[in-house]
Image (cartoon, rainbow, N blue to C red):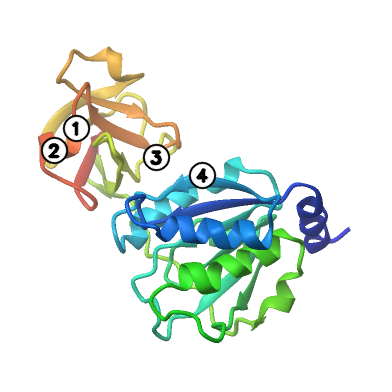
């Protein structure tokens, strides 16, 4: 049985759609999207990954979706809409990659799953009457519902002739006996997620953030006193910096792009 058939068979018994947006929960926007999905597919299970992405922050959305999508079963449809280019010439895509299906604007939000080589991308047409400022409801949600119902990807549009956009990823580099990385995400606790990993950094390294000594790698927050800086291996497999019972982002005054140094000797 081919990959597409496997996805279709799974959705015929347990349709599942995840939602990642910057819509928040104050306005009706995410409720309207849920209404479209449930109206088209009453038996669907909807799972919120996040609706608290900062408005228009595609890089943050790509990180959050990139962490979460692998935890869902094969065949899941992922609806991801952080779309500062809504209504412009940017493409709207439905993508099959690594046994999952993604519906999103072509702006880099799918950089994580697009790391695979077996990617099939379809350009989605804009439905007649769609609001040019709300493609989440009028374009992406109907497409996600159709895919979750088992409709083949190829029926939703035409093959995408370009290359789906991927965000540029900063790579750590050596400076003498140090490895220089950077902050790639700040979570709601103010923890600084870096692009450094144990594969790059030995356990005996000490760390600095923008020149401030943060000590060696620890196991968890409780290894330092309240208010102390702690460097640890985060749950996504990257090295993170936190302040126990506080915010490292606020304490250090840095965010995405901040310099993190692993000192090896």
Q: Which of 212 and 247 is in front in this view?
A: 247
Q: Are the residues flagged by discs 2 and 1 in contact, CB closer than 8 Å?
A: yes
**Element at label 1:** loop
Q: Which of marks 3 and 4 is nearer the N terminus?
A: 4
Circle 4 is placed at which residue position?
A: 68
**Residue for point 71% across, 51% down:** 15
Tell me if mark 3 has few (under 14), some (14-19) or many (20+) residues whose alpha carbon lies within 10 angstroms of its own.
Answer: few
Q: Are the residues flagged by discs 3 and 2 in contact, CB closer than 8 Å?
A: no
CA separation in Å, label 4 and label 1: 23 Å
CA separation in Å, label 3 and label 2: 27 Å
Decide: is 221 above or below 175: above
Circle 3 is placed at which residue position?
A: 200
**Residue for point 68% across, 54% down:** 42
CA separation in Å, label 2 and label 1: 5 Å
**Residue for point 27% across, 35% down:** 191
Tell me if mark 4 has few (under 14), some (14-19) or many (20+) residues whose alpha carbon lies within 10 angstroms of its own.
Answer: some
CA separation in Å, label 2 and label 4: 26 Å
Taking the view exactly as shown, the residue that stands out farthest to the right is: 1
Circle 2 is placed at which residue position?
A: 250
Q: Earlier in the sequence, mark 2 or mark 4?
A: 4
Q: Are the residues flagged by discs 3 and 4 in contact, CB closer than 8 Å?
A: no
- Looking at the rendered image, the quarter that the C terminus falls into is top left
Tell me if mark 2 has few (under 14), some (14-19) or many (20+) residues whose alpha carbon lies within 10 angstroms of its own.
Answer: few
Report how many numbered discs are placed on residues in the image. 4
Pinpoint residue 245: horizontal percent, then vertical percent.
Answer: 21, 22
Pinpoint residue 112: horizontal percent, then vertical percent.
Answer: 50, 56
CA separation in Å, label 3 and label 4: 23 Å
Circle 1 is placed at which residue position?
A: 247
Q: Which of marks 4 and 1 is nearer the N terminus?
A: 4
**Element at label 4:** helix
Q: Which of marks 3 and 1 is nearer the N terminus?
A: 3
**Residue 88 in which image quadrant:** bottom left
């Amino acid at each position: 049985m081919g990959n597409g058939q496997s996805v279709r068979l799974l959705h015929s018994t347990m349709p599942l759609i995840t939602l990642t947006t910057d819509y928040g929960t104050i306005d009706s926007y995410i409720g309207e999207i849920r209404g479209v999905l449930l109206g088209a597919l009453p038996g669907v299970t909807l799972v919120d990954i996040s609706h608290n992405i900062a408005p228009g922050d595609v890089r943050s959305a790509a990180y959050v979706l990139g962490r979460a999508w692998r935890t869902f079963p094969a065949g899941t449809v992922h609806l991801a809409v952080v779309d500062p280019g809504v209504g412009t010439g940017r493409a709207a895509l439905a993508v099959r990659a690594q046994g999952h299906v993604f519906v999103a604007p072509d702006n880099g939000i799918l950089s994580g799953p697009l790391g695979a080589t077996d990617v099939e991308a379809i350009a989605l047409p804009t439905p007649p009457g769609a609001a040019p400022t709300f493609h989440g409801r009028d374009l992406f949600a109907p497409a996600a519902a159709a895919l979750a119902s088992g409709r083949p990807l190829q029926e939703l549009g035409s093959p995408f002739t370009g290359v789906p956009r991927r965000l540029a990823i900063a790579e750590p580099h050596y400076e003498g006996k140090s490895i220089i990385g950077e902050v790639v995400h700040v979570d709601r606790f103010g923890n600084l997620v870096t692009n450094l990993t144990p594969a790059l950094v030995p356990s005996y390294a000490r760390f600095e953030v923008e020149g401030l000594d943060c000590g060696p790698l620890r196991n968890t927050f409780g290894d330092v006193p309240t208010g102390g800086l702690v460097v640890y291996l985060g749950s996504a497999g990257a090295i993170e910096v936190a302040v126990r019972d506080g915010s490292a982002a606020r304490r250090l005054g840095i965010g995405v792009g901040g310099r993190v140094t692993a000192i090896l000797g």
